Amino acid sequence: AKADITESKTGVSFPAVLKDSQQLLGVGLRKKSVMGLKSINVYAFGVYADESDVKKCLAEKYGSLSVSQLKEKDVNEDLMESDVCMTVRLQIVYGRLSIRSVRNAFEESVGDRLQKFGGSDNKELLQSFTSQFKDDIKIPRGSTIDLSKERGYVLRTKIDGKEVGSIQSKLLCHSILDLYIGDAPFDQQVRDNLESNLAPLLND
Ligand code: DAO
Ligand code: DAO
Ligand code: DAO
């Protein structure tokens, strides 16, 4: 079996494979600056994609290319747009996360992407999501949140393995993934290593 990978700044480790077939493409750190001053580490994250979906959806277009050739293309765009099953696993390291701050951060980060990709007014869509983050949900340090894009652009959210909801929306799936592998990601390192980690899935 392949080895787990540890996010270096937090020491949080991620399994190399999730759900039997989703391969780890990179790990990173989500920070947040508070009051413009210091920044806190909020969660470590790992990005996974289903190996056979990657082959099916991307190999024909990219299969013969080297890593440096892949870097010239917008492979990340194809990954976000196509019906490849993916998971972003978040492991919370900040010990005082309130649902209110999750809601606010979500409206800021995801709201920004919904506007970017959806154009018109998505405020209602956004609020219909965030209103479902019930005030009594606890997300202590050590919690694991899985955001999974399943077949047909269904976004399923699980906290510590327990489902909290699912929503079918291509726009929402794209907006969430863009936070992690888009052009202005939370951690540039994941973006930088994406092609090197995808290449073996495309070619073997
Ligand atoms: O205590 O006010 C504060 C700072 C909290 C920052 C929280 C950022 C939340 C990021 C989203 C987490 C999603 C699980
Ligand atoms: O880090 O800014 C960010 C956005 C993270 C998206 C996280 C969604 C978390 C959903 C948690 C549901 C809690 C009920
Ligand atoms: O339709 O099953 C349902 C209820 C949806 C609940 C949504 C919970 C929040 C999921 C937000 C996803 C954010 C990444």
Image (cartoon, rainbow, N blue to C red):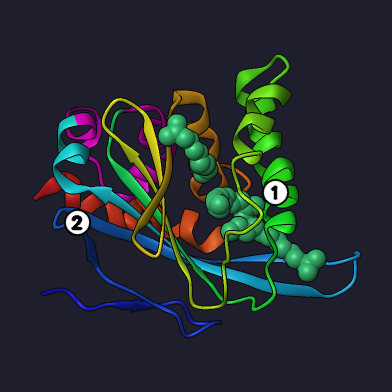
**Residue 144 placement (x, y as % from top left):** 44, 67
Looking at the rendered structure, the secondary structure element under dot 1 is helix
Q: Which residue is mark 2?
A: 19
Foreground pick, 55 / 63: 55
Which amino acid lies under the numbered mark 2 shown in the image of this protein?
Lys
Is residue 183 in view? Answer: yes
Q: Residues within 10 Å of mark 1 (few under 14, many from 20)?
A: some
Check residue 62 for magenta coloring. Answer: yes
Magenta stretch prevailing secondary structure: helix
Q: Residue furthest front?
A: 136
In this rendering, position of residue 84 left or right of residue 200:
right
Up the image or down, 55 lies above or below 30; here it is above
Cα distance, mark 2 to mark 1? Answer: 28 Å
Q: Give the image quarter of residue 129.
A: top right
Residue 103 bears which disc, if any? 1
Up the image or down, 186 lies above or below 73; here it is below
| Residue at 28% over, 35% down | 84
